[in-house]
Image (spheres, rainbow, N blue to C red):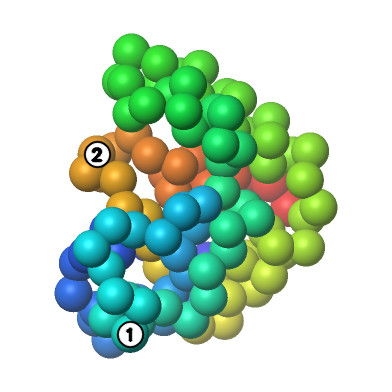
Amino acid sequence: MQIQLKRIYDKRDSSDGYRVLVDGMWPRGMAKEDAHIDEWYRDIAPSKDLVKWFSHDRERWNDFYEAYRRELRDRDSTLAQTLREHANEEGLTLLFAARDEECNNAVVLRDFLKRTR
């Protein structure tokens, strides 16, 4: 299973495989034709309330991590299974807009995809 993370503003690479935006909102300043995405999975993003509460505050990271994992467990597993299939077949790049590359929803989603089946 190959899953990598990348900011949507970063340059596309041939090793990206299947590119999926996993944010609930479209990234500021990014034209859709410049994003080079295969899919936009808004429904797998954290809830708006959770994102608003977290507000990219690193002191809230551990609580955000656990709360988003709970949301992922409680959702329809079809999207997660589709992402796992892409990761196994051609490689998967989870795209996100957050400036913080270590504490964001794509990190949680990657870990969730790797640890649960």
- Residue type at mark 2? Asp
* Mark 1 or 2: the one toward you: 1
User: Which residue is pictured at 18% across the width and 74% down the height?
Assistant: 11
Position of residue 43 in the picture relative to residue 4 (left or right) = right
User: Which callout, 1 or 2, points at the residue further toward the start of the chain?
Assistant: 1
Vertical comparison of 97 with 59: above or below: below
User: CA separation, marks 1 and 2?
Assistant: 24 Å
Query: Within 10 angstroms of label 1, few (less than 14), some, or many (20 or more) residues?
Result: few
Q: Are marks 1 and 2 in contact (CB under 8 Å)?
A: no
- Picture coordinates of residue 65, whole percent (x, y): 50, 28
Which label sits on residue 108? none
- Picture coordinates of residue 85, whole percent (x, y): 65, 73
Q: Secondary structure at mark 2?
A: loop
Q: Secondary structure at mark 1?
A: helix
Query: Within 10 angstroms of label 2, few (less than 14), some, or many (20 or more) residues?
Result: few
On the image, which quarter does residue 60 sit in?
top left
User: Which residue is pictured at 73% across the width and 53% down the height?
Assistant: 117
Residue situated in front as seen by the camera: 87 or 47: 47
- Residue with the mark numbered 2: 100
Residue 12 in sight:
yes
Position of residue 40 in the picture relative to residue 96 (left or right) = right
Which label sits on residue 33? 1
On the image, which quarter does residue 41 sit in?
bottom right
